[in-house]
Image: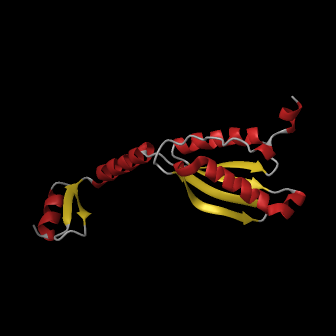
Amino acid sequence: MSKQEALAIAQERDLDLVEISPDADPPVCKIVDWGKFNYQRTKQLQKNRKTTKSLDMKQMRFGLKIGAHDLQIKMGKVAKFLETGHKVKVTLFYRGREQAHKEIGFKIAQKVIEDFGDTIVVDQQPQLAGKQLSFVIRNSGKSTVAYQAKPQEEGESNAKTEDA
């Protein structure tokens, strides 16, 4: 139908001629009440936005002097974030003279990545930016994320256990 015919029919019915698909050949149009059409489209967009799950980036921060148990607890929380589908930004922060020993932060970062194994993917490799070392990890999707703390080596045993 020609454009003039469609406009005449729309005016006759006190409705509007709305172009639905301008890229089609020929373009697709509808004769509708523009106010009602726009209202329904807005409501549908709101409904779609409500049902989509927004994946946030969670952050876990810790210092260089973190104990083995504290690290295990925090990595357990990171595992829960990863299970729900979030990305996690792990940040190690340096204080004062700790900046002279940047390699300690990289060792901790590597330990975290190795402990998760192939259940994670490193989206952003560990980078040092000012007083913070950060990297981003996400679930690889291969299996469920289960944080398994590797047993401490003999040289890393705590003094408390030796006294007992």
The residue drawn where x is 15% and y is 57% is 12
Scheme of colours in the image: secondary structure
The picture places residue 115, in percent across and down from the top left corner, at: 63, 47
Q: Quadrant of residue 34?
A: bottom left
Q: Residue furthest top?
A: 164
Residue under the point 72% across and 49% down: 61
Q: Quadrant of the N terminus?
A: bottom left
Q: How many marks?
A: 0
Of all residues, the one furthest to the front in this rendering is 154
| Residue 96 left/right relative to 147 | right
Where residue 97 sits: x, y (%)? 90, 59
Q: Nearer the viewer, residue 71 or 59?
A: 71
Which one is in front, 82 or 29?
Answer: 82
57 sits left or right of 66 in the view: left
In this rendering, position of residue 125 left or right of residue 83: right
Which quadrant, please, contains the C terminus? top right
Farthest left residue in view = 1
- Residue at image position (64%, 39%) is 76
Residue 9 in picture, x, y percent from top left: 13, 60
Question: Image check: 140 left or right of 44?
Answer: right
Compared to residue 22, the image places residue 15 above or below, namely: above
Name the spot of residue 15 as percent of width and height, x first: 22, 55
- Residue found 58% across the figure and 39% down from its top: 80
Question: In front: 162, or 17?
Answer: 162
